[in-house]
Amino acid sequence: MAVRIEKPSVIEAAGNKPKIIQEFFGRVNSGSNDVSIAKMKSPGGWVEPGQKPEFDEYTVVLKGMLRVETENGILDIHAGEAVMTPRGEWIRYSTPGEEGAEYIAVCIPAFSPGTVHRDE
C-alpha cells in the first residue's frame, strides 16, 4: 500500500549556523529504520563537525554548492551534481559559498544521532 507523507519533520542540525533539515522518510517522520530521505537547506558559511557514520549517504545538490571533505581530499558538489559517501569513512560537510546550498540526502540505513559518530 502506498504511504503518503503530508509534511516533513524538522530535525535539529549540527554545525556552526542554523541549517534546516526536513525529514520526509526516516526514524522521526515515518518510523523507517531502513532509509532516511531529507531536504537540507544550509546557509553560506555553515560547517558541521566531521563524522564517521554507520550509513551510506547519497546526496543530490539542487542549488548552490556543497563541500565534501574526506581523508582523501575535498570535493565541491554543485547544483545538478551528486555524491555518495560510504559508511565508516570520515567526512565533513560545509557550504562555504555565500548562497549556501539546498540538497536532498538519502541515508541507508536511516540516519540516527547514535550512528553518525560526530567528532568531539
Image (cartoon, rainbow, N blue to C red):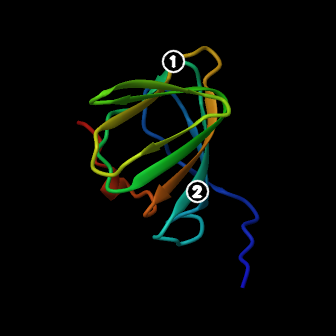
Q: Above or below — where is 96 with respect to 50?
A: above
> Which residue is outermost to the top?
98
| Residue at (39% x, 23% y) in the render | 74
Q: Quadrant of the C terminus?
A: top left
Q: What crowding class fits label 1: few (fewer than 14 Cα within 10 Å), some (14-19), or many (20 or more)?
A: some
Which residue is at 53% across, 60% downward? 36
The quarter of the picture where residue 40 lies is top right
**Considering depth in this image, is 68 or 111 the residue closer to the camera?**
68
Question: Quadrant of the rendered structure where residue 102 is?
Answer: top right
Figure quadrant of the N terminus: bottom right
Q: Which residue is mark 2?
A: 37
Q: Where 5 sits versus 23, above or below?
A: below
Q: Amino acid at mark 1?
A: Pro
* Residue shown at 75% from the left, 72% from the top: 4
Residue lying farthest left?
120
Choose between 86 and 37: the one closer to the eye.
86
Which residue lies most toward the bottom here?
1
Using the rendered view, name the quadrant where residue 99 is placed: top right
Look at mark 1 in the image and give the residue it sits on: 96
Nearer the observer, 103 or 43: 103
Give percent across and percent down for residue 9: 62, 57
Determine the residue positioned at 25% across, 37% down: 119
Q: Position of residue 106 (x, y in %)?
A: 54, 53
Q: CA distance from mark 1 to mark 2?
A: 23 Å
Q: Which mark is residue 10?
A: none
Q: Nearer the viewer, residue 70 or 103?
A: 70
**Label 2 Cα neighbours within 10 Å, binned few <14 / some 14-19 / many ≥20:** many
What element does badge 2 sit on?
A: strand
- Determine whether, in the image, residue 71 is placed left or right of residue 9: left
* Amino acid under disc 2: Ile
**Mark positioned earlier in the residue sequence (1 or 2):** 2
